[in-house]
Image (cartoon, rainbow, N blue to C red):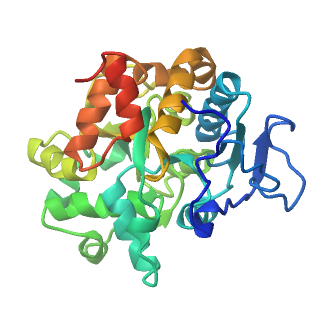
Amino acid sequence: MKRGRSWRDGCPVGLLRTVALGCVMTVSLVPGCTPAGASASAGTDPGVTSLVFMGWATGGSMQMRVDATAETVRLEHPEWRVTSFAPGGEARMQETRIQQGADFYLAPVFRPLEIEVNASLRPDLDYAALTDYRIVMPSAYTYVQCLARGGAGLGDIGDIVARRYPFKMGSGVGMVRLLFDKILRYYGSSISDSEAWGASYQNAVMTSAEGVEALQSGRVDVGFTCASVPHPVYVGVDFDVRLVELADPGLVAFLAKYGCAPGVIPAGSYPFVNTDVPTVYAQESLVARPDIPDEVVYEVCKSVFEHLDIVLAAHPASGRQLTPEGIAAAIVLAEQSGLSYHAGALRYYRERGWVA
């Protein structure tokens, strides 16, 4: 690979702008800090390869994974200028992606739902094109988890519609709420229909202390979320709650077009899970903008696997994905949901003999 030349040379000015929002970490700064108003690309030497990695929130799992990935690249390529930063929220992350201010980041799962939610909010933009990406490598599995208080008597998610159950649901808005609406529609209903039979919805991050408190107090009796398993916030739950199954083969097949695959939450994952619970999962991935050169993406992949211990120290569960078997399975899942891996990443995996 030719060293010392930035892939940005000759790119349109609009593609050169890097938005630095929230906290920024560079190799020369204390992690998570930067002078106010500094730009991640300020003062970049045009003769140096400059890469920006974007996470989510300082101290969170996503940011730790992104920071660890950026560190592997710094170690392998000390001559590059590598920055990682936390945008600090959904709106800032979206703005950065739209302005193409990050080269690598962890993309939201359920890409079709992401486009459906955000394109309608930004009718003046070609949202799908501006936020297009190619997958570089898998990062984490995120499972659909529907929790119901014991008194709800729900066994399978289809029971909600069959019984016209007047639930009080806590969930995030956006993609998570839309995914639940898709499930209701599979059973011939919808969120608006459910409200007509007495159901109600509260905005609550169910993978937070607030979400657990809402279930425990009865403020909500059903919680719907997508998260890793086991999620730390549920490990200490000791009140009467259960995981609702997503076991209908037709529903599982229906959700495949949104990037879901059949999965199981194993017995013992939480104190309240005594038997395996069927559900679906999606793949969270590190992605790159389509215009990043193949050789750069190849070198990022090589850096991660040369220093895999750094990534696994930040997120041990990534060890399930960052194996030859995990890589191959992730590529198949991406293809099934209409997503593409970056050519530079595929070249690396083929050279390692992990994919055909």
Residue 237 seen: no
Is 311 displayed left or right of 160 in the figure?
A: right
Q: Position of residue 99 (x, y in %)?
A: 58, 67
Q: Can you tell which quarter of the image residue 249 is in?
A: top left
Q: Is residue 140 above or below residue 98?
A: above
Q: Can you tell which quarter of the image residue 336 is in?
A: top left
Q: Position of residue 93 (x, y in %)?
A: 59, 59
Q: Quadrant of the N terminus?
A: top right
Residue 243 seen: yes
Extreme residue toward the right, this view = 35
Q: Quadrant of the C terminus?
A: top left
Along the line of sight, the residue nearer the viewer: 78 or 3: 3
Q: Residue at x 51, y 58 (%)?
A: 219
Q: Residue at x 32, y 23 (%)?
A: 350
Looking at the image, how many numbered discs can be counted on the residues?
0
Is 284 displayed left or right of 296 in the figure?
A: left
Q: Is residue 348 above or below residue 165?
A: above
Q: Is residue 177 above or below residue 33?
A: below
